[in-house]
Amino acid sequence: MEILPSIDLRGGRVVRLAQGDYERQTVYGDDAVSVARQFVSAGARWIHMVDLDAARTGRRTNAAAIAGVCQEVQASVELGGGIRDDAAAREALEMGVARVIVGSAAVERWDWFAALAGRADMAGKVVLGIDARSGRVAAHGWTEQADLTVSELAARARDLPLAAIIYTDIERDGMLAGPDLETTAQLIADTELPVIASGGVASLDDVARCRDIGCAAAIIGRAYYEGRIDLADACEIARA
């Protein structure tokens, strides 16, 4: 299992939101490249980046920070937020991103998403982001609720050549409450796609539990920034 430390960007700064609420923001730094280098020094091979501004507006205003991490740090980067069409996906890859995460646009325009995932030049580069609140899928930077359950969306993805599915329980995200292991395990069993756990990972025990249920990776955010998880230890446990 891989550990994916997270860099969430808003206004060029490294931040975290509590339960996806843009009014409940904590700033952890102004230099994404410096933060990413700390991740790599601790053993991270992948970095999870989210452009919160683009997730909300569709406009890529944090491109400089994203490109800086991709070009100056020796790690693979996956990017979410604002990937809503072919142009946005292409722009991300041109910045050096290894794979793109599509959430809202997949919910709203499934045929387009399936076509993107099926393109030969996108093989291994498309991730489905399933963000949910109370079992139902959320969209538009987590500000809107879709009439779709997690299992229904995952069923659509079962036969697509995706790099992975990222499942985030919004109510746990940034709350240090532990990940939703039950739903994550169900996704692993139902889809046979690599599943990445996100939202609420708060301890090394959580890392071990994600590994033990068969997660391909686990995303760590607030727990790292607040010193609750030693990233080097998390990487060692994940790969045990």
Image (tube, grey):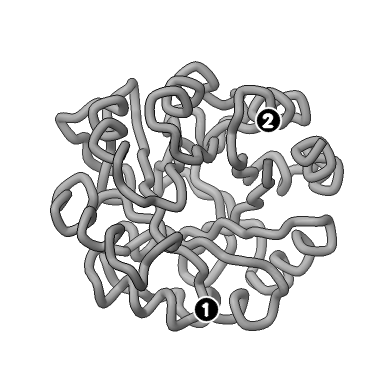
189 or 104: nearer the viewer? 189
Image location of residue 26, percent across then percent down: 57, 50
Residue at 35% across, 74% down: 60
178 or 84: nearer the viewer? 84
At mark 2, the secondary structure is helix
217 or 160: nearer the viewer? 160
Query: Residue 219 occupies which quadrant of the picture?
Result: top right
Q: Residue furthest top?
A: 182
Image location of residue 78, percent across then percent down: 51, 61
Image location of residue 61, percent across then percent down: 39, 76
Lower position in the chain sequence, tag 1 or tag 2: 1
Q: Quadrant of the N terminus?
A: top right
Residue at 59% across, 76% down: 70
What distance separates the C-alpha of mark 1 from that of mark 2? 28 Å
Looking at the image, residue 223 lies above or below residue 169: below
Q: Which residue is mark 1?
A: 96
Q: Is residue 51 visible?
A: no
In screen coordinates, is 50 left or right of 220?
A: left
Q: Which residue is mark 2?
A: 211
What residue type is disc 2 on? Answer: Arg
